[in-house]
Amino acid sequence: MGLLRKVIPGLVVVCVSSALVIALAGPSWAESTDWSRLSLEQAISRALERNPAVIESRLEWRRMQGAADGVAGVLVENPIVSVEGGVRRDQGWGGNQPSITARIDQPLDVFGQAGSRKRVASDVVAAAAARLALVRSEIGARVRLLYLATQVAQHRMLLCRERLSTAKQTSEALQMRVRLGASSDIDLQMAIAEMSRAEAALQQAQAESLRSLLAMREALDLPSRSKIEPSDGLVPPALAPSEADPQNALGHHVAVQAVEKQRLAMDSEIVRLERERLPRIAVGLAAERPSDQERFVGLALSVSPALWRRNQGPLAAARVERERLAFEHATTLASLERRYTALRDEQVVRMQELSALDRALSSEEQARALVRVGWQSGKFDFLRVLIAERSVADTKQARLDLWADLWSNVIELRRLAGQEP
């Protein structure tokens, strides 16, 4: 239950705009696919295909790629063509003659303006690709947590059914013993109460399972009545392998890379703005017919100096954004390192806790068997049987909750180490 509460708030980006997903990803094929045996890889593949955030990030990357291809395909700017026509007067009104002037100018990028624009376009594409990888990693981790929550909920139902079955058998045995006079009605009422408690626990586990299935359907964009059952079994997690240099691995984390790519793109934008402050040069061809007796054809050279518009505002904003991205890069890396170190330390402690719980469960199961034998032989009262049964059930539930916490840490550690899609 705690794991599901921890997962649900992060699903806002997963569960919005279903209509947008259907419109962009094509027709739904959920109805033609059997999800009754759903593996983890199938769940991740389905989520990455249908998730709105992934689709929007992919479209954004494609848009940036198209813009970059357009910039890369243009060698020079469009030429400027100007034509002038009028009447020239040389000697009074009688000397009016038609005059025509035509000119074509071709702007040139001689100070690296074109190269800076292409560099900005390519860096923006790299930043969009890094954001897409980050979104895919986040969605993959969330689906893993949801899949784990579904596994835990179903395993909890199995434990509750086992507890209920044991309580029913005990109640039936007590009814026989009461009729034979070997036990009292007090023992029978305690057994019935324990059976009711086990039934209530089973109903609660079923409600949690329905909630986890709802979250899974929303994450995978499945119909409301689709049957989902995880095919991967829930096994005890193992301690993740030690990382000798976690900072080296975290430096290549998708979150760090996304900020780094944005910082590089902002560096290129600053270079572009500075290059555009340099004078623009254009060469041209001019032709003039001042009068019926005169003709002129020649070359032209024009310079456009940046006297007033020198990109002061955009440059100041870009430099401030560059400082913000540098700060975000440092804080993101430090936060990931703290999170990674804390999870590693917690995982070691949790594994020790799991070992202690396994030993306790083994001893409690043996004690329960011995108490039952003693109770059936009349040496112990039923209260000791009830305490032994509850102790075993509580320890099994605690171990299951610990498995969930351990697997949640493993998923997070793998994501931090860059092992998620």
Image (cartoon, grey):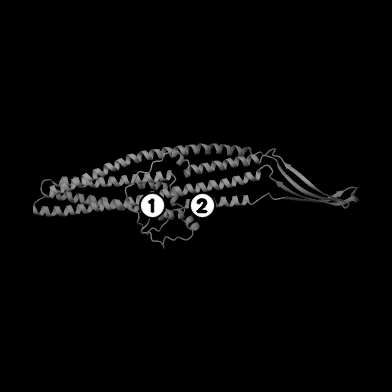
Q: Label 1: few (<14), some or many (≥20) within 10 Å? A: many
- Residue at the image point whose x is 54% and y is 47% from the top: 126
In the depicted structure, whether residue 247 falls above or below residue 172: above
Q: Is residue 31 above or below residue 386?
A: below
Kind of residue at badge 1 = Ala
Give neighbour class at mark 2: few <14, some 14-19, many 20+ (Cα, 10 Å): some
Q: Would you say 282 lies left or right of 242 here?
A: right
Residue 86 in the image: x percent, y percent?
82, 51
Q: Could you say where residue 275 lies in the image, as x and y percent from the top left?
A: 65, 40
Residue extending furthest toward the left: 181
Question: Which quarter of the picture shows residue 278?
Answer: top right
Q: Say what secondary structure mark 1 lies in.
A: helix
What residue do we see at 54% from left, 41% from top? 263
Q: Residue at x 37, y 51 (%)?
A: 147
Image depth: mark 1 or mark 2 in front = 2
Q: Which residue is mark 2?
A: 58
Name the amino acid type tagged 2. Answer: Arg
Quarter where residue 245 is shown:
top left
Q: Which mark is residue 215?
A: 1
N-terminal label among 1 and 2: 2
Residue visible at 43% across and 44% down in the picture: 417
Q: Percent x, y for residue 376?
A: 12, 50
Residue positioned most to the front:
244
Disc 2 secondary structure class: helix
